[in-house]
Amino acid sequence: MSDRDGLIWKDGEMVPWREANTHVLTHTLHYGMGVFEGVRAYDADGGTAIFRLEAHTDRLFNSAKIMNMPMPFDKETLNAAQRAAVRENGLKSAYIRPMVYYGSEGMGLRADNLKTHVIIAAWEWGAYMGEENLTKGIKVATSSYTRHHPNITMTKAKANGAYMNSMLALQEAIAHGCHEALLLDSHGFVAEGSGENFFMIKDGVIYTPDLSAALDGITRKTVFQIAKELGYQVVEKRITRDEVYIADEAFFTGTAAEVTPIRELDNRPIGCGSRGPITAKIQAMYFDIVHGRSAAHEAWLSRVTK
Ligand SMILES: Cc1[nH+]cc(COP(=O)(O)O)c(CN[C@@H](CCC(=O)O)C(=O)O)c1O
């Protein structure tokens, strides 16, 4: 990722990609206290647009507040910087990574003289789990790792160090021949994927876990609105892994994952064993919205050329 042409926004200015470096004694590199976002820009009708930019930036600031990290820039500055990162790299579509971190001003857990830094990078990133899996669906395994308890790692913050749990779970799932992991919470109920929120459908009703052990996903919120507009009820409830086994459909949502159908869990086909009909409708409407084909949701698009 480091050896490419382009520009990265770093602490208020655009720097050449290869020069966007940090010292090996950067505090966040050692202790993992940092926060980040995953945001997508789409090649939309009417010009490249970032999807729900303000919501992502709001969450970045909330994550920083939860981690007690002072933010050195305001929201509008970071919104403009994200638009610039896409525009000045000449990207028509992009994955954007804002990240807030402590620098190399000090070491140790006391952290009393550290400075908060912000970078924003953008690059081309296609379908998170492969184009064909948006139709075929993915294979998922219930993880042997437990999702964070809200009093161990703050689950409403998108915090760097929390993703060791995600990486361990995902690597385990891949080692077992699957595409993704489904993590249970500390009570054994379904929480979310390693980098996605979880939904299942049974008898025409859409279910999803509450947010006590899951990130408050922006795609999740979007799917709630899409479901409402399509006339489907969404129920937040405790979900057990065996309810998923006998569900009619299941899917993950996330900025990277978009709407990814789940075709099996723990070697048990879910419903028809590929993308279900309601999942297909939700996915199609999601892609219409992010590509600027839904006038009703134009407010969710931030054009990068403005
Ligand atoms: C743990 C987790 N849960 C749910 C979500 C969905 O949130 P949202 O994107 O706001 O709908 C994400 C986003 N995962 C990001 C990081 C992926 C990565 O590989 O890094 C993403 O989808 O960009 C999570 O990381």
Image (cartoon, helix red, strand yellow):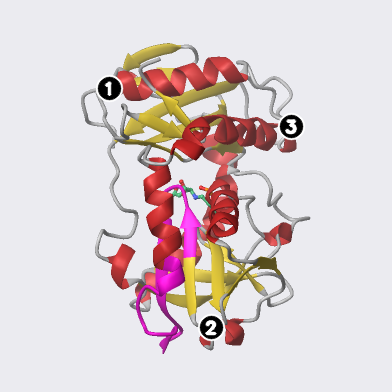
Identify which amino acid the numbered label 3 is placed on.
Answer: Asn
Q: Position of residue 131 (x, y in %)?
A: 26, 59
Q: Secondary structure at mark 1?
A: loop
Q: Give the number of callouts.
A: 3
Assess whether mark 2 and mark 3 are in contact (beta carbons under 8 angstroms): no
* Quadrant of the drawing holding the C terminus: top left
Residue at (47, 41) in percent of width and height: 38
Cα–Cα span, label 3 and label 2: 40 Å
User: Where is mark 1, residue-wise?
Assistant: 89
Q: Secondary structure at mark 3?
A: loop
Disc 3 vs disc 1: which is toward the camera? 1
Cα–Cα span, label 3 and label 1: 32 Å
Crowdedness near tag 3: few (<14), some (14–19) or many (≥20) residues, C-alpha within 10 Å: few
Residue at (44, 85) in percent of width and height: 271
Q: Which residues are magenta?
A: 252-279
Q: In the image, 74: left or right of 68?
A: left
Assess whether mark 2 and mark 1 are in contact (beta carbons under 8 angstroms): no
Q: Secondary structure at mark 2?
A: loop
Q: In the image, 300: left or right of 304?
A: right
User: Where is mark 2, residue-wise?
Assistant: 247
Identify which amino acid the numbered label 2 is placed on.
Answer: Ala
Along the line of sight, the residue nearer the viewer: 138 or 35: 138
Identify which amino acid the numbered label 1 is placed on.
Answer: Asn
Magenta stretch holds residue 274: yes
Cα–Cα span, label 1 and label 2: 43 Å
Magenta stretch holds residue 177: no
Disc 3 vs disc 2: which is toward the camera? 2
Q: Earlier in the sequence, mark 1 or mark 2?
A: 1
